[in-house]
Image (cartoon, grey):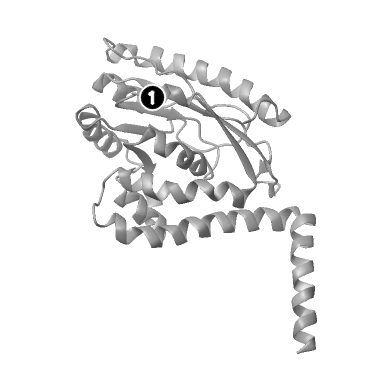
Amino acid sequence: MAILLYAGVGLGIAVPVVFALSRTVRYYAKLTGWYLGITITGLLFIPFMALRPRHPYNLVAWSAICKHFHLIIGARYSIRGLHHLENLGACVVVANHQHAIDGTGMNKLWAALKRCTIVSKKEVLYAGPFGLGLWLGGVIFIDRLNSEKSREAINKVSTKLKRDDLKLWMFPEGTRRNTGEIHSFKKGAFHVAIAAQIPILPIVYSQYYFMDEKQRKFDNGNIIISVLPPISTEGMTVSDVNDLMEQSHKLMSEEFSKISAAAQEGKNLN
């Protein structure tokens, strides 16, 4: 009994020390905890989601739990511009994409977004309870290797956006990259917005300066999410897609630089 007691005390002391001193251990522990949290909550929510499959409010309910996962990854969030969501109906949300943990920021916005769904790569559909939960929440899965099928899937939902007062969240960069800049955009989101004659809503995450996948670094840090004013597409046609895309990219890049500096300095965080 005494040996077990000493062993327990030893582990209780050793685990926090190793976590604090080893960057690699900290990196894997945070990611494992985050993914486990999503998987477990997915399993818990799936039976309730199945009662109204493909309904966008399923994601609102799930996000009420998942938005607290910032405690697992050690991130402090500050959200700006929420007033731009007030009385905002159907729109296409465009956001920069840096890492899977972007999902925690999305969860913090979901209650304000209300009726919102996501476009995601089809591989996520097979991610166990997480993928099934997203499907039950109405997420649209596309095959990035088949551009024709991807366009068909997105075009189908574009006809529903205005009719159902639905918001569509897209990552126009296509691939997640935490490199300190917003990369070039693909045109899909802007085609959808113009076809449906609904606004583009830019949302910008500050740089994840505290994370580096190559170096297995995942420290605590600040994240600012900025909701920018909607950009009207009223009266635009297909010929305006490039201009709309460039305007959105410019506004988001400027905001990204500003809030990334503020996040690193820890200034004006609420």
243 relative to 98 in the view: left or right: left
Name the quarter where the C terminus is drawn: top right
Where residue 51 appears, as percent x and y from the top left, is 24, 56
Query: Of residues 137 and 189, which is closer to you in this image?
Result: 137
Name the quarter where the N terminus is drawn: bottom right
Query: Of residues 154 and 72, which is closer to you in this image?
Result: 72
Residue sitting at x 27%, y 39%: 149
Q: Is residue 34 above or below residue 265?
A: below
153 relative to 248 in the view: left or right: left
Residue 33: name its quadrant.
bottom right
162 relative to 169 in the view: left or right: left
Residue sitting at x 60%, y 27%: 181
Q: Is residue 194 above or below residue 51?
A: above
Q: Amino acid at mark 1?
A: Glu
Within 10 Å of the Cα at label 1, are there few (<14), some (14-19), or many (20+) other Cα atoms?
few
User: Where does label 1 land, which residue?
Assistant: 86
Query: Of residues 233 and 243, which is closer to you in this image?
Result: 233
Where residue 115 appears, as percent x and y from the top left, is 31, 36
Where residue 113 appears, as percent x and y from the top left, is 38, 33
